[in-house]
Image: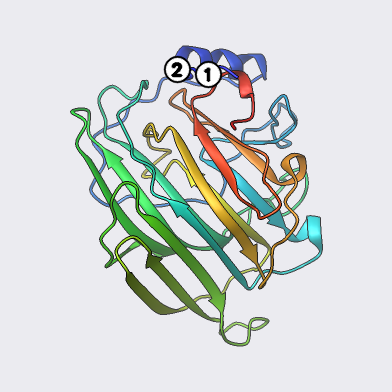
Amino acid sequence: MKSLRFAPAAALAVASILGFAFASPALADPPPLHGHSPIQPHRNPDGSLGRSPQFLALSQNWAGYEIANFQSGQKYTSARASWIVAPITFGSTLSQGSDEYAATWVGIGGFCTDANCGGIDPTLIQLGTQSEVAPDGTATYSAWYEALPQAPVTIPLAIHAGDQVTASLQCAGLCNGQKQAWFLTMTNLSTNQSWSHPVAYNSSLLSVEWIEEAPVMGGVLPLANFNVATVAGASANGGLPVLSFLDNGIVMIDPWGQAVLVSEPDGNNNFAACYGFEAFVPCP
């Protein structure tokens, strides 16, 4: 497979073929804090969920894998994953010089509430790593957690490109009521640093996700070129759920003309997300 960067014009051409239209957004310099969002799906003219040529869910801000209650019949009270913090560079974009961002996270909630994405779950509790790169190539890396609609909170762990990180969240209290108690943990295996924190939050428990995201601040922010991000051991409710490429995969075309594809998961729920590969061919 050719691994060409998906230029903005090419991404917009594919989006046009699929029936989506983008205006060229005007973006002011974003403030230092930037948040995360439930899925922002592409919509077909009838309002249903847009899909890629491989029939994967098509989003403006998420790429990765999800499992929803309407698919499995389960509610989700814990999730875990490991990943390598991918080095980032400033990529080709329509953002006219803004900084670019990328986030990798594990979370519960925030996905569609039905197969046609007629509704979107507004609850989302998540934690992960985030990367930011300026037009001059200066890159910074950090860790965070967020329980919507609250603002993101910085996790006091040093994060560097190439670090191996493990993150998990678990509902530790009575999870069927209105007083859920969550316990979040993150370990940087490369530096032997760990962090944990209790969070009071009422989640719908309707989905679980392992995501590469374009963060938001008044809209979807331009996506940094992370090349390939690898996620390992995506687990939920204490085990390895069966992830299906067709049923659970999500691909992205963001409003800035950038694309993210995903590989098929292996038997250990390891998968890759690839920045800017052409024509929606799954990444290796």
> What label does residue 162 carry, if any?
none
Toward which corner of the image does residue 176 lie, by quadrant? Answer: bottom right
Front-most of residues 64 and 41:
64
Task: Write the residue at 35% across / 53% down.
Answer: 163
Q: Quarter-wise, where is residue 7 in the image?
A: top left
Q: Left or right: 2 with respect to 86?
A: right
Residue 96, relative to residue 117: is it above or below?
Answer: above
**Label 1 secondary element:** helix
Q: Give residue 63's quadrant in the image.
A: top right
- Name the residue nearer the viewer: 143 or 238: 238
- Viewed as shown, does residue 168 lie left or right of 174? left
* Above or below for 22 versus 209: above
- Label 1 CA crowd tier, 10 Å (few <14, some 14–19, many 20+): many
Q: Quadrant of the N terminus?
A: top right
Q: Which residue is mark 2?
A: 8
Q: Position of residue 172 (x, y in %)?
A: 56, 84
Comparing 106 with 191, the one in front is: 191
Which residue in the structure is indicated by mark 1? 11
Looking at the image, residue 224 sits to the left or right of residue 166; the answer is left
Q: Assess whether mark 2 and mark 1 are in contact (beta carbons under 8 angstroms).
A: yes
- Residue 21 image point, x, y percent: 56, 19
**What element does badge 2 sit on?**
helix
